[in-house]
Image (spheres, grey):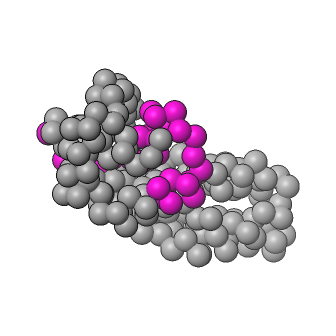
Amino acid sequence: MGPDLRSKYLYFQKFDGNTGFFSLTAILTAMEYPSSKEEVSDVGKYLETKDYIKALFQIDDVYVQIATQGIIYSEDLIERDVIEEDRTKSIARLVAQSESEIERPDKKQIKERRKNFFTILTNMKKKLGSSASPEIYDLKLDIDVIKTELQKMNPDRDIIKQKMMKLDYNNRIANEITMLYHSLNIY
């Protein structure tokens, strides 16, 4: 399976009147293509390099929209019957059920999509407790810095990664750190 099915999916979305950006993670999941955040980002970069898509690389996902070259490529695949149209349309239905298109993520959409991260960070602070030790105090402030970065449209990945590395050393919040690493696009 190559980029053909992914771009063909976006092709059918475009001609169904859905011209916004779509979650690449949702598309890959609907295709039953397990991928890490790094792989999702790599797929987005590859398709963008080929001029098949326009991509918005956010910290929580990669949002994609078909470009003119992607339309041409998809039409060529349709003419040559490379991929079953029914399979592509079934993927389109799965993605439509789980994730809607976005024009461009605005502040409200960003906060909504990242609310689970804020919940995880709040739980981390609770698990650290109310200790008066300077170490715990600093860790809580580091969590606040991560929260502040995630509220931005384009958070600074280096700052988040640096702060998360400091949190890694506390066993009480190890599970939450692991969840954040798997959920954020900061490798």
Judge left or right: residue 170 versus residue 18.
Answer: right
Residue 99 can be seen, yes or no: yes
Residue 96 can be seen, yes or no: no
Is residue 25 located in the magenta-colored stretch of the structure?
yes
Image coordinates for residue 107, horizontal then vertical, percent: 33, 59
In the rendered image, the vertical position of residue 25 relative to residue 32, given as above or below: below
In the rendered image, the vertical position of residue 46 relative to residue 26, given as above or below: below
Q: Nearer the viewer, residue 23 or 5?
A: 5
Query: Magenta part of the protein: which range?
Result: 17-43
Judge left or right: residue 129 versus residue 26.
Answer: right
Q: Nearer the viewer, residue 78 or 173?
A: 78
Is residue 14 located in the magenta-colored stretch of the structure?
no
Residue in the picture at 83% in, 60% down:
170
Image coordinates for residue 157, horizontal then vertical, percent: 55, 71
Residue in the picture at 51% in, 67% down:
148
Residue in the picture at 60% in, 69% down:
160
Residue 144, by quadrant, is bottom right
Residue 145, by quadrant, is bottom right
Residue 165, by quadrant, is bottom right
